[in-house]
Image (cartoon, grey):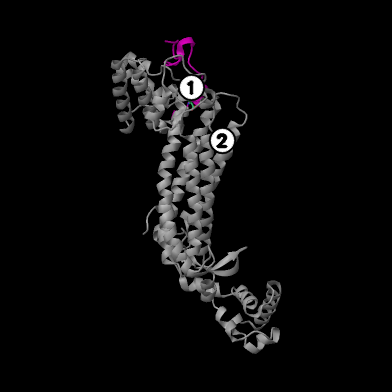
Amino acid sequence: MGGRGSNTIWGGRYKLGPAEIMERINASIGFDRRLYAQDIAGSLAHCDMLVAQGILSTKDGRAIKRGLAKVREEIEAGRFKFSTKLEDIHLNVESRLTELIGAAGGRLHTARSRNDQVALDVRLWVRDTIDRLEPMLADLQAALIDRAEEHAATIMPGFTHLQTAQPITFGHHLLAYVEMFGRDRGRLADCRARLNESPLGAAALAGSPHPIDPRKTARALGFARPMANSLDAVSDRDYVVEFIAAASLTAVHLSRLSEEIVIWCSAPFRFIALSDAFTTGSSIMPQKRNPDAAELARGKVGRIVGAFVALCTMLKGLPLTYGKDMQEDKEPLFDAADSLELGVAAMAGMVRDLEANAERMRAVAAADYSVATDLADWLVRKVGLPFREAHHVTGRLVGLAADKGVDLDKLSLAEMRAVEPRIDRSVYRVLTVEASVNARRSLGGTAPANVARAVQEARRRYLGRSR
Ligand code: ARG
């Protein structure tokens, strides 16, 4: 044991305890207690391996496992006394274990260091988080797909530059996000596959002189294999960065959809309404119904992308192997994951909650000469004009209609023929928003028939079911 006030775990060569400020800057228990379940799972696997390899007696192994189960119980019941003197979750658990079972507790750390231990715990935590996010994203896709099916033929304006471009269907618009979240799920799955190697056995940095079997612990903890290089095992946090990068893109997608919901809810648009469940009132303006959940899902992207920058900056100058800087990975990681989970769940709720104002969407879709491209395409198909010339002729007709303050289909045949004599009566058939969307049956296009098919396809691809 070390001197008075020094650390009971590593205080051998210490005469004095740390300065108060040292204890404060050093301790991570305030946030890394969230790793307790992963820490204990890792210790249980490590203990089994030590026993199987004859490094630890069966008796000590049993006592350790019983003790660890008790520690977990205490933590989960809120009875565990976390101590900043004991720095982090690893030392808090080990110290309590030894209190509970005596000297055998001190044998658990054989052939292990906090360096491979923390690398393991964080890997397991990220993996668990991905496994939780995966079904949440699938649920968000399911909500979008259901609403897309309902609105396969609901016409809305499609925008570029936020200017009315062409009529589209609301279902098609929602399915665009299903694709984005599908790629997000793919990125998380890639990240999971790459991180799924066990760092245990690296010990402090160089490996262990004990006859350990890292394959055994890797298998027990569901890893594909142990890591190949002990220095890499304790020093990289690329899996945290990769997870946060995937989370950032997911958050960006959530944010864009949130932005659209905010716009669609606004009085000048009135495309959708959210119920009481997903809006808040104003403390002064009684008429207000604010889409706060969408705004927060949009706002949280800053924290998640911020975490990415924080992690890359923390890592970029670190020499191999472990540096205490790496303790700074946890708060940004936890915050990014929490923010994303909230955002995804709130978005699934909003998508299920929103009510579309189909009449209003159609009216806006029909305004501002949104079918002008259909007229140009008709001139190409029926009159045989080169597209550039058709564009020109259509531009003149739009100008004429705008001067008169009417829609294109309100121009008389005589007025149209004055611009292009080969136009005939059949042109009027393409000048409605319904005709416009129905005509867009090319692969990936917005036609209601396409959307109905795409809904089935998306259920198969993303949800593994046909309904
Ligand atoms: N709390 C530390 C962290 O989060 C655990 C590893 C400490 N390792 C050490 N050599 N001091 O990084």
- Which mark sits nearer the N-terminus, 1 or 2? 1
Residue that numbered label 2 is attached to: 311
Give x and y (percent) for residue 348.
42, 54
Q: Quadrant of the C terminus?
A: bottom left
Dominant secondary-structure state across the stretch colored magenta: loop
Relative to 12, does residue 447 appear above or below in the rendering?
Answer: below
Q: Residue at x 56, y 43 (%)?
A: 305
Q: Could you tell me which secondary element the residue under label 2 belongs to?
A: helix
Q: How many marks?
A: 2
Give x and y (percent) for residue 95.
38, 20
Rounded to the nearest angstrom, the CA distance separating label 1 from label 2 is 23 Å
Looking at the image, which is closer to me, 57 or 330? 57
Q: Which residues are magenta?
A: 1-30
The amino acid type, in three-letter code, at marker 2 is Leu
User: Is residue 371 visible to us here?
Assistant: yes
User: Is 108 contained in the magenta span?
Assistant: no
Q: Residue at x 31, y 29 (%)?
A: 74
User: Is 20 contained in the magenta span?
Assistant: yes
Categorize mark 1 by other alpha carbons within 10 Å: few (<14), some (14-19), many (20+): many
Residue that numbered label 1 is attached to: 202
Q: Quadrant of the N terminus?
A: top left
| Between marks 1 and 2 in the image, the one whose residue lies nearer the viewer | 1
Which label is found at residue 32?
none
Name the quadrant containing residue 128.
top left
The amino acid type, in three-letter code, at marker 1 is Ala
Relative to 10, does residue 421 appear above or below in the rendering?
Answer: below
Give x and y (percent) for residue 54.
35, 15
Relative to 401, does residue 414 appear above or below in the rendering?
Answer: below
User: Is residue 265 visible to us here?
Assistant: no
